[in-house]
Amino acid sequence: MHAITIPEPGGPEALVWSEVPDPVAGEGEVLVEVVAGAVNRADILQRQGFYNPPPGASPYPGLECSGRIAAVGPGVSGWTVGDEVCALLAGGGYAEKVAVPAGQLLPVPEGIDVRRAAALPEVVCTVWSNVFMVSHLRPGETLLVHGGSSGIGTMAIQLAKAVGAKVAVTAGTREKLDRCAELGADILVNYREQDFVEEVAKATDGAGADVILDNMGAKYLDRNVKALAVNGRLAIIGMQGGIKGELNIATLLNKRAAISATSLRARPPAEKRAIVAAVREHVWPLLDAGHIRPVVDRELPMSEAAAAHRVVEESGHVGKVLLVAR
């Protein structure tokens, strides 16, 4: 088969479409013939040499894919050859085939093309695990999403609205904020021109955000805590704004607030299975019914992964950038 390899870390040109050995479905795994994968920020970090795959994972980038089951390994039940699926991966999505633990598979939702389903697994599992399983967003509460026009952001908006929450977003252009509004965002903050702490306070009569989903890390840490409501929850899922920040513990104590920080890729298989099972139970009915949908900015051939990385690094996209294998 062919896959995107990284002979040496570097810029987008480090991604090479190479012929590599076919994977084999092991115990508890299925072999997926990949139709499409999707680009995530973690893939960029891996390409740069900063985010190696966990032990035992495929060396190729790609944390999610969609396709059809080509083979079923020993000990797998409930899946058959030919099933259309999408999958949460620890790596290997930038390839024509990938071996996946059966517990990390999801069926392609009703009414969604198998190709576009590649935009779902990583974002849905990230949003559901952080906003709902960890931070327990409830109806009537306010969620603040940084990077509202990203793949994570566009899904977070839709899921929060589906459960009856109010949604605030930050983005860097009017066009991106308009797209967020189309998905249901109530409070729109242009981070280049406005202070999200002030804007969220004004929109909530001074209460603040009950839950914040943050992809920035250090740069926003102090302001995120200031923007939290009493009993608020800050979920940090990225480090685009750096890794070391200063935290005012007194503010955190006064608000009786909580901070969590999680990543998905390196979690043990049992934790991933639990997240995928929760997503299938709670989110898949919303997708099947058409209440939420994947947001896809563009599709490029998988062999042109370098061009896709440039798009994501320039932050000119809304939603997901897909890599089509066939």
Image (tube, rainbow, N blue to C red):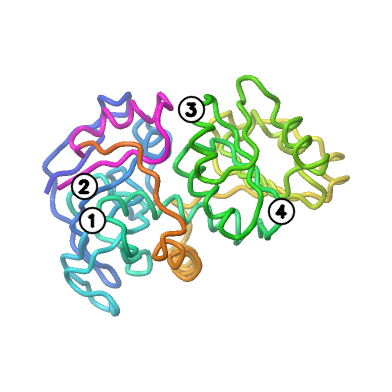
**Mark 4, residue position:** 141
Q: Nearer the viewer, residue 275 or 27?
A: 275
Q: Was residue 312 drawn as part of the magenta stretch in this picture?
A: yes
Q: Secondary structure at mark 2?
A: loop
How packed mark 2 is, by other alpha carbons closer than 10 Å (few <14, some 14-19, many 20 or more), is many
- Do labels 2 and 1 touch, CB within 8 Å? yes
**Mark 2, residue position:** 95
2 or 4: tag closer to the N-terminus: 2
Q: Position of residue 274 (x, y in %)?
A: 49, 68
- Check the image and report above or below for 301 versus 114: above
Q: Which residues are magenta?
A: 301-326
Q: Secondary structure at mark 4?
A: loop
Q: Residue at x 38, y 33 (%)?
A: 44
Q: CA distance from mark 1 to mark 4?
A: 40 Å
Location of residue 273 by image quarter? bottom left
Select label 1 or label 3 by which is in front.
3
Q: CA distance from mark 3 to mark 2?
A: 33 Å
Q: Residue at x 27, y 44 (%)?
A: 60
* Mark drawn on residue 98: 1
4 or 3: tag closer to the N-terminus: 4
Q: Secondary structure at mark 1?
A: strand
Q: Nearer the viewer, residue 110 or 84?
A: 110
1 or 4: tag closer to the N-terminus: 1
3 or 2: tag closer to the N-terminus: 2
**Mark 3, residue position:** 175
Q: Was residue 269 drawn as part of the magenta stretch in this picture?
A: no
